[in-house]
Amino acid sequence: MKAVYIILALGLFLLLLSMERVQKERTGRQAAALIEDIEFKKARNQYLRYQTGIYNSPDKIIPAAQERGLVTTPAANIIILGEEK
Amino acid sequence: MTAGERIKICGFLCLAPAACLAARLFYLQTFRHGELAGKAESRIYTQTAQNTLRGRILDRNGVVLAESLRTYAVAVSKKNVNNAEGLIKALSETLDLRPADIKKIWREKKNFFYVKKHVSPPEYEALESRLHSAGLRGVELEPEYTRIYPFDGIAQDILGAVNSRNRGLSGIELMYDKELSEELKSRRVKRARSGGIIYDRSQLISPETADIYLTIDAMGQYYTESILKKYARQYGVKSAFAIVQDSQNGNILAAASWPARDGRALPFQFSYEPGSTFKTLAVAAALDTGAIKPADIISLDNNKWTISGITIRDHQKKPALTISEILEVSSNIGAAKIADKVGAKTMYAYIKKFGFGVRSNVGFLGEQAGILRDHTRWRPVDTAKAGYGYTISATAVQIVSAYSAIANGGTLMAAHLIDKIKFADGRQTPLAKPARIRRVIEEASAAQLKTMLQNVVRLGTGKNARIAGYSVAGKTGTTEKLAQDGKYGRSLHIASFCGFVPASQPHFTILVVLDEPEQALFGSVSADIFAGIGQKFLDLYAVQPDIPQEDAAR
């Protein structure tokens, strides 16, 4: 009888062990998915900054500003606080 | 049969399958371990591609000029595909590829192949959503990095380029490749049943790359490039370049070359005979040593002066000129006689003191030192010719640094192109601390020279360099280039202008050089370009005018 109980206990232990492994794997996958999601969002954010950078490039923005008649303020018209003129 | 025997039989029946299982496991683990472990490895794990992450290159204000963008490499693992036709259609539609091209590579490859590299995040997002909605399997997405230049084309000659593996090929990208790059070696990652990759914490990258900050001002660089390009096209020059330096601390604020090519920065790599812009330095040496006084008058010997059997000619109407007039009208005989008065040894010593004959502190890839022969090998005519910028050759960065020395009162400052290196752990190495190399001329000599150079712009050959509201000091230069037969050809010229603004308190020293313009320009167009670039920098840095408008117009 003793051997049967030992076998049953061993089986139960192995069942718990496999359940724990499955759970760990599932959590790992969820974490991996979240990490991947964060990495992707970071990449998308960087890509959007890159696109903004392209539109902010002087060779895009200056001709566009000039077309609309915008000009650089002459330095004479700029007052810098704390600096004597 | 006794109860004990029955229990033994039951126990044996229960244990027999377990014993068989144990025996089978023993067999697999011992005799077929290698084969099965290999199969499991290839089924569960995969390797990511090797890649290089690079740090950023920024301008002096922190504007990003180059950085590494996270993109994706899309690959197919055929053995994990559940719907080949559907997958090919999805890939071709979302990645803008022809189905025939995907099918061709599909037939050629046994299992794994890349469909497209450098896929942008929006494309990746569209693909993933399509795969998810259609339940398609077998696509692997590997993160990688692509080098991007948001201000496409600006400072291209300085920044340089990288190769397909993100390693520096030229320019700053190559000069600071060690600091900028970090090899991301091929790594073992777990693969999901669907074929995708499961990333774990070990896959997260903490960059160890450094960011390189330049002394360049992106906006000023843009203006310098665009003004240079406009004139270079208009006058059909072979090449053109311009450099803008902070007159006080030696920092390079812009360095433009036309035509622009990756890593070909002419202000550092092109050396030429500076011609008349060098007369300023002959006069500087003469004033500083007391060989001449500003009020001295030099005879032009009827516009013909023979020395060592070689005749130097001039086209001036006056029989004699003051020192200031020699610079104003750019008299060759006047400058030659001044250099002759200074003498070969002293002239050579001053040229060396101004920083010629050695590479600048910038150390740009392919930077030239110029040519400066030892004075013991000079004939008297060589000394005279050195007075108007022949028999020696120099780079733009050397000339602009020498003019900055005059602008700041006589001190040669080290030129800087790199402002600082910022490491991932927050450490910073400043590289553009103002560094005095040496005092070249006395302040009094520099002040006298400044007045003379202002006269060049007010009354002489540099009138086109005038900027309304600002005092400008500078000198034009036209050099005849050596033709293929070794003689100076009258048809091949280098036209230049070097000066600083505002002359009363110099902020910017600018040199403009046009190589082989279609017509002889005599530095006037270079002076035009100088004025254009100078005006933009004065506006950008809000430098207040130093002379009333009505005086500037005169």
Image (cartoon, rainbow, N blue to C red):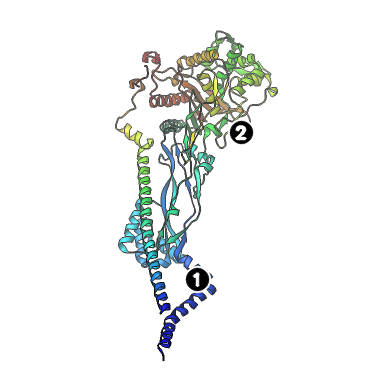
Q: Is residue A5 visible?
A: yes
Number of marks in the rendered image: 2
Q: Quadrant of residue B220?
A: top left
Percent position of residue B516, x then y:
52, 31
Question: Looking at the picture, does residue B98 appear above or below residue B293?
Answer: below
| Kind of residue sitting beneath label 2 | Gln
Q: At x 41% / y 90%, what residue is drawn?
A: B2
Quadrant housing the C terminus of chain B: top left
For this rendering, which residue is in front, B74 or B392? B74
- Kindly identify which residue carries mark 1: B36
Q: What is the chain identity of the residue bearing mark 1?
A: B
Mark 1, other Cα within 10 Å: few <14 / some 14–19 / many ≥20: few
Q: Residue furthest bottom?
A: B1
Q: What is the chain identity of the residue bearing mark 2?
A: B
Q: Is residue B303 visible?
A: no
- Kindly identify which residue carries mark 2: B484
